Image (tube, grey):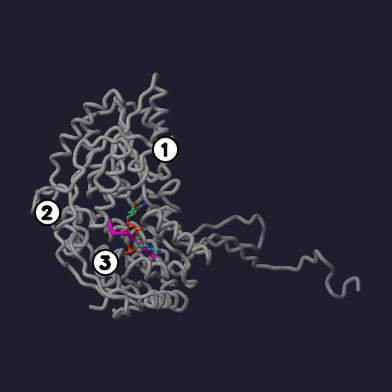
Amino acid sequence: MPELFIDGTWRDAGDGGSREIRCPADGSVVAAVSEGTAEDALAAVRAARRAFDHGPWRDTSALERAQILHRVADLLEAEKSEVARRESLDTGKRLVESEIDVDDIVGVFRHYAGLANADSGRVVDPGMPNVSSRIVHEPVGVCALITPWNYPLLQTSWKVAPALAAGNTFVLKPSELTPSTSIWLMNALTEAGVPAGVANLVLGSGARVGAPLTEAPEVDLVSFTGGLETGRKIMAAASATVKKVALELGGKNPNIVFADADLDVALDYALTAVFLDSGQVCSGGARLIVEESIHDDFVDELVRRAEKIRVGGPFDSGAETGPLISAEHREKVESYVAAGLAEGATLRVGGRRPDDPELDKGFFYLPTILDDCTADMSVVQEESFGPVLTVETFGGSSPDEFEDRAVEIANHTIYGLAGAVWTENAGRAERVARRLRHGTIWINDYHPYVPQAEWGGYKQSGIGRELGLAGLNEYRETKHIWHNTKPAAQYWFGEPAGEGA
Ligand code: NAP
């Protein structure tokens, strides 16, 4: 089946090769796709450029764009089972989690449908007669949208929905490992009424089809979600033509537990914070930072519960978490655990693949807890992006010193995506939340987000914010229009012809 969607039609790829998509839970082939070449990527860019410069899309009314986004949400709701099934087959994640993802994606499309029609600009008082002055928003142009494999369609929706809501055209490049729901989406966008050339899809590796998108002069904006190293490359590539760049990068997120927290709840959430989706969550709470007085009991109980977590495939209703995305990724996680142990961490549970022969063909790795960690260890500082919890402790001789120390440890990272603080002391919760240099802070909670709130990172976790009104602004240019309705010469330099001659 052709897998390049360019100018409203499915086309065969050039000689980019083909790829079997394998379910990470058992290695079974779930799809076979052909991949594009750099020339295919540039053909998609040219189609998006033509559609933006000469097509009807940028001048469609905001109301019409909103209606189209609502129709996409309707299609997602109608085909929820199929979309979730495809997502689970590509990622190996539990079907129930993919279904929750689809609900979130519906919410994202409806959210941006609402924003499309809101905030159409404002009038500015110029303070003089015969002049009108106003601020208007306009689409940026052609957007290159590059997404990762962990939440394939959700991450895509965070880009596609605002790009369309603002009137842009785009080329989407999903992760080579998880293309299936992007293919579904192109058909859904067409059915919902998106004109030819507005939405384009190229499949293939980042090096082959992603990089050309970030370099092409016809692209105005690159919106990327993925790892820090790739983000740095993209920022450099985009600089040659000064593209707008939005980067949603990694995180190494602190989860701080004070002794005065509701410890049963904090413990339960500490598990979900890190082991949800086998730790392959950018905002996962992989760094537990626990007050020293409760450390022993808290960690013993975490270990007891982590040991019992059942791993399994997407359709195993007894499984609590799934596999890692690929053999290479599992090796990376293993190397971080080995490095942590070499640097002095203590392995409390996990640290290996499961024994169950039924799981042999999948890329499973057991929930792992490394105790006695310190902020300078590579396993603490860098994203293993797997089911690996590191435990650090803090103490002090006064309540103020406790807070200072917890904040200092939690901020000791180049990242700044998300984090949490657990305490029953409301003042402490607010103080710590304000001092943490991370883009989302949960107080006595972990993981929830709402489309109305902005999402993005401090420090090297990214540039720009997604969702919320600011998320739409990433995809718009803002223009001040000053209209002098009665221009008259002022003769600051010289006099009118005839006078004084
Ligand atoms: P990745 O390796 O950086 O890849 C992300 C995307 O970029 C893929 O589509 C990849 O293509 C493409 N790519 C790679 N090199 C490229 C280049 N030179 N030019 C253009 N595109 C290129 O990240 P990942 O392993 O897929 O995803 C995991 C990372 O995403 C983690 O670091 C995680 O924290 C981050 N993430 C962040 C957020 C957030 O909201 N901040 C959300 C989710 C994930 P191929 O892989 O197909 O070759």
Q: Is residue 125 above or below residue 203?
A: above
Residue 307: give x, y in percent of width and height: 15, 39
Q: Could you tell me how far apart the alpha carbons at marks 2 and 3 are, in whole angstroms? A: 24 Å
The answer to which quarter of the image holds residue 47 is bottom left
* Residue count near mark 1 (Cα–Cα under 10 Å), binned few <14, some 14–19, many ≥20: many
Residue 72 appears in the rendering: yes
Q: Quadrant of ligand 1?
A: bottom left
- Looking at mark 2, is its residue's CB closer than 8 Å to ligand 1? no
Residue found at the far top of this picture: 397
Q: Quadrant of the N terminus?
A: bottom left
| Viewer-side residue, 417 vs 37 | 37
* Residue count near mark 2 (Cα–Cα under 10 Å), binned few <14, some 14–19, many ≥20: some
Mark toward the viewer: 2 or 1:
2
Q: Secondary structure at mark 3?
A: loop
At label 2, the amino acid type is Leu
Q: Quadrant of the C terminus?
A: bottom right
Taking the spot 83% from the left edge, 71% from the top edge, the residue there is 496
At label 3, the amino acid type is Pro
Q: Which residue is mark 3?
A: 179
Q: Is residue 451 magenta?
A: no
Disc sitting over residue 411 in the figure: 1
Q: Which residues are magenta?
A: 145-150
Q: Which residue is mark 2?
A: 359
At label 1, the amino acid type is Asn
Q: Could you tell me how far apart the alpha carbons at marks 2 and 1 are, in whole angstroms? A: 38 Å
Q: Is residue 114 above or below residue 55?
A: above
Q: Secondary structure at mark 1?
A: loop
Residue 136: give x, y in percent of width and height: 51, 62
Per the picture, the main secondary structure of the magenta-coloured stretch is loop
Taking the spot 41% from the left edge, 73% from the top edge, the residue there is 57
Mark toward the viewer: 2 or 3:
2
Q: Earlier in the sequence, mark 2 or mark 3?
A: 3
